[in-house]
């Protein structure tokens, strides 16, 4: 449908993604097909570039989706603890708290399916919240704001990818060893997490040797660009 309307690229989101699920019908349960399965099915027929997203965190994750046909990988949760992310302190603390040991797909906070850490708000309203995005989000916004001021993680949306996929969340530039190359390229070596890979950054917020403040999209480049 999207390709027929002339889009330039597709972003394929797997079920492990944190935050809102990309669905055409907001009332329908989101597809639970694994990301690699989705990529295999879509890349065969799509004649536009495909970007993979959902549950990705490590160099190995990125290598797998590139091998499956994606031209780039989009990461979100992986950078929520980075200094540049601007994540609310209460959300940051919950991401590190072993008491939050489960994520769920819920419509409790916004009226649209989204994956978040399970908390008391989800338990109480997850099955009761009506479908109604973004109106439900506007209703809960003051509650979430007050929860943040009170440092109460049980009354705010704690977006996060599926805990079963990866527990890796990078904590800023000191955890991600990067080397700037020329013309917008850089090499990234997650500390203790696989081998270094060279990427071209695909977002406008890159610069000054810092990581972008939002989700990143990485595109692998030929080995010849690797530093020795």
Image: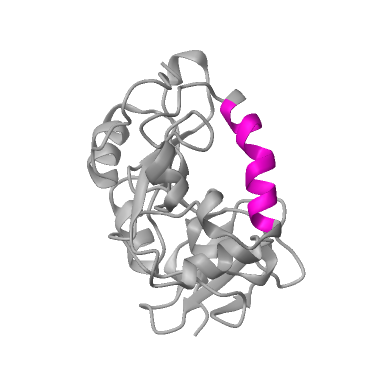
User: What's the residue at 57%, 28% (across, down)?
Assistant: 136
99 over 9 or under it: above or below: below
Q: Give the total number of marks visible in the rendering.
A: 0
Q: Nearer the viewer, residue 204 or 171?
A: 171
- Report the side of 166 relative to 125 (left or right): left
Quarter of the figure that contains the N terminus: top left
Q: Nearer the viewer, residue 23 or 70?
A: 23
33 over 149 or under it: above or below: above
Q: Is residue 4 visible?
A: yes
* Quarter occupied by residue 83: bottom right
27 over 157 or under it: above or below: above
User: What's the residue at 39%, 20% (across, down)?
Assistant: 27
Residue 75 belongs to magenta span:
no
User: What's the residue at 46%, 83% (across, down)?
Assistant: 191
Q: Which residues are magenta?
A: 136-148
Give residue 57's position: percent from left, percent from top. 41, 63
User: What's the residue at 44%, 77% (across, down)?
Assistant: 196
Q: Is residue 18 visible?
A: no
Magenta region's main secondary structure? helix
- Report the side of 161 relative to 78 (left or right): left
Give residue 78's position: percent from left, percent from top. 49, 63
- Report the side of 8 relative to 61 (left or right): right
């Amino acid at each position: 449908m999207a390709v027929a309307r002339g889009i330039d690229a597709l972003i394929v989101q797997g079920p492990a993604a944190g935050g809102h699920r990309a669905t055409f019908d907001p009332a329908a349960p989101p597809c639970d097909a694994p990301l690699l399965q989705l990529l295999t099915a879509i890349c065969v027929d799509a004649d536009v570039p495909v970007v993979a997203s959902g549950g990705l965190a490590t160099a190995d994750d990125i290598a797998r989706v590139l091998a499956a046909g994606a031209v780039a990988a989009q990461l979100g949760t992986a950078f929520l603890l980075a200094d540049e992310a601007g994540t609310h302190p209460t959300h940051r603390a919950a991401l590190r708290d072993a008491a939050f040991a489960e994520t769920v797909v819920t419509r409790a906070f916004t009226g649209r399916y989204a994956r978040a850490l399970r908390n008391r708000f989800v338990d109480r309203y997850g099955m009761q919240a009506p479908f109604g995005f973004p109106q439900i989000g506007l209703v809960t916004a003051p509650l979430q704001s007050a929860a943040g001021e009170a440092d109460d993680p049980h009354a705010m949306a704690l977006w996060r990818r599926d805990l079963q996929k990866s527990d890796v969340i990078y904590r800023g530039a000191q955890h991600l060893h990067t080397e700037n190359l020329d013309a917008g390229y850089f090499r990234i070596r997650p500390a203790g997490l696989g081998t270094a890979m060279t990427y071209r950054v695909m977002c406008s917020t890159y610069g000054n040797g810092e990581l972008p403040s939002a989700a990143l999209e990485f595109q692998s480049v030929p080995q010849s660009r690797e530093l020795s």
